[in-house]
């Protein structure tokens, strides 16, 4: 069983990351969920740590084996880690992660690691930029604040005319998949570009949109019957977060401010569903630029690293 003293130290560290990302403390429910997650990882021998002679943490990490459908691959995934801010502690942590990853590489035939770094851990972000590939940045924003900022931005621009929203229909899926893939393939900064270059990319997107038809959680933007883009979402019911699942603007409609229009539509939906915060992931330059303008903050960076690099 995980010692209470150890558990409390880790929860305190994670509370600090959370406060820096959200500007507020974790709720009691979130603390309980984190503690349960840590206990489960500990019991399954997927939580590794070291303490000094006084029982204070030197480093820890949690790992799991995760199948990422978009890559059609299983990863050695480290979603949570920390070390003291000393070269010695960092070196020992990396060595321990490498040791565990190589063991899984041999036993489970896993080639790559996915590691998630908190945005305030700037040393680790710079380190993994050199040894890995950034696959996405997770961004967090305040729903009300972003709505206000989007409305101000749209007032300064020529408001797009003749556009309307509708929910995604099954008959929309083939054309939408084609437009979505085309949009990402022409953007070198998109994290989805490499995936769409693979044969499995089209199949994954078809399944993605078919599920959104069932859930009703995708708005399609149209003009004169033509699809101009879409934005999709999920909602974390437990924590009351809105989750941006995808957004794209069709090539023929880019440069008209439609991303702002779609984000505003979605955020008003989040507000209606009483989600004070929303989260989404991207590496696309235009998305990150707009995120900065509406005060969304980076929360986590995720890197893909070859296990042989550790």
Image (cartoon, rainbow, N blue to C red):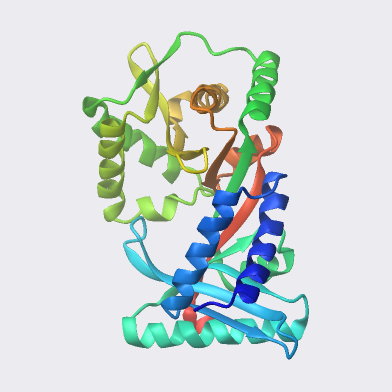
Q: Position of residue 182 (x, y in %)?
A: 38, 39
Question: Vertical placement of 139 versus 83: above or below?
Answer: above
Nearer-the-camera pick, 58 or 7: 7
Q: Position of residue 243 (x, y in %)?
A: 49, 40
Question: Vertical placement of 106 versus 209: above or below?
Answer: below
Residue 11 appearing in the image:
yes
User: Which residue is at a point 65% across and 72% down the rendered structure image?
Assistant: 82
User: Which residue is at a point 70% across and 81% down the rendered structure image?
Assistant: 58
Nearer-the-camera pick, 88 or 31: 31
Q: Position of residue 80 (x, y in %)?
A: 56, 67
For the C terminus, the image quarter is: bottom right
Residue 310 appearing in the image:
no
Q: Position of residue 265 (x, y in %)?
A: 51, 22
User: Which residue is at a point 35% across and 69% down the rendered structure image?
Assistant: 74
Query: Furthest residue to the right?
Result: 86
33 sits to left or right of 18: left
Question: Vertical placement of 295 versus 262: above or below?
Answer: below
User: Quadrant of residue 227 in the image?
Assistant: top left
Query: Furthest residue to the left?
Result: 171
Nearer-the-camera pick, 54 or 243: 54
31 sits to left or right of 190: right
Counting every numbered tag in the picture gives 0
122 sits to left or right of 77: right
Query: Furthest residue to the bottom?
Result: 53
Question: Vertical placement of 249 versus 136: above or below?
Answer: above
């Amino acid at each position: 069983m995980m010692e209470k003293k150890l558990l409390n130290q880790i929860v305190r560290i994670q509370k600090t990351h959370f406060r820096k990302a959200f500007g507020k403390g974790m709720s009691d429910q979130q603390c309980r969920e984190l503690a349960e997650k840590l206990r489960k990882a500990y019991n399954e021998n997927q939580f590794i740590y070291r303490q000094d002679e006084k029982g204070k943490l030197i480093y820890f990490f949690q790992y799991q084996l995760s199948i990422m459908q978009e890559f059609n691959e299983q990863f050695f995934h480290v979603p949570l880690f920390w070390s003291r801010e000393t070269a010695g502690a960092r070196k020992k942590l990396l060595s321990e992660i490498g040791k565990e990853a190589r063991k899984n590489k041999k036993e489970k035939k896993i080639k790559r690691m996915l590691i998630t770094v908190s945005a305030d851990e700037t040393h680790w972000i710079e380190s993994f930029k050199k040894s890995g590939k950034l696959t996405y940045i997770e961004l967090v924003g305040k729903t009300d604040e972003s709505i206000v900022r989007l409305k101000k931005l749209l007032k300064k621009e020529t408001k797009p005319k003749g556009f309307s929203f509708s929910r995604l229909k099954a008959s929309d899926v083939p054309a939408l998949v084609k437009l979505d893939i085309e949009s990402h393939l022409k953007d070198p900064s998109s994290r989805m570009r490499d995936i769409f270059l693979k044969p499995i990319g089209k199949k994954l997107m078809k399944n993605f949109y078919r599920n959104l038809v069932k859930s009703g959680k995708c708005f399609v933007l149209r003009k004169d019957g033509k699809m101009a883009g879409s934005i999709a979402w999920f909602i974390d019911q437990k924590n009351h977060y809105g989750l941006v699942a995808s957004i794209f603007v069709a090539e023929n409609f880019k440069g008209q401010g439609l991303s702002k229009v779609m984000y505003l539509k979605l955020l008003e939906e989040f507000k209606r569903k009483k989600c004070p915060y929303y989260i989404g992931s991207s590496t696309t330059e235009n998305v990150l630029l707009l995120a900065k303008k509406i005060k969304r903050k980076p929360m986590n960076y995720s890197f893909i690293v070859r296990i042989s690099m550790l």
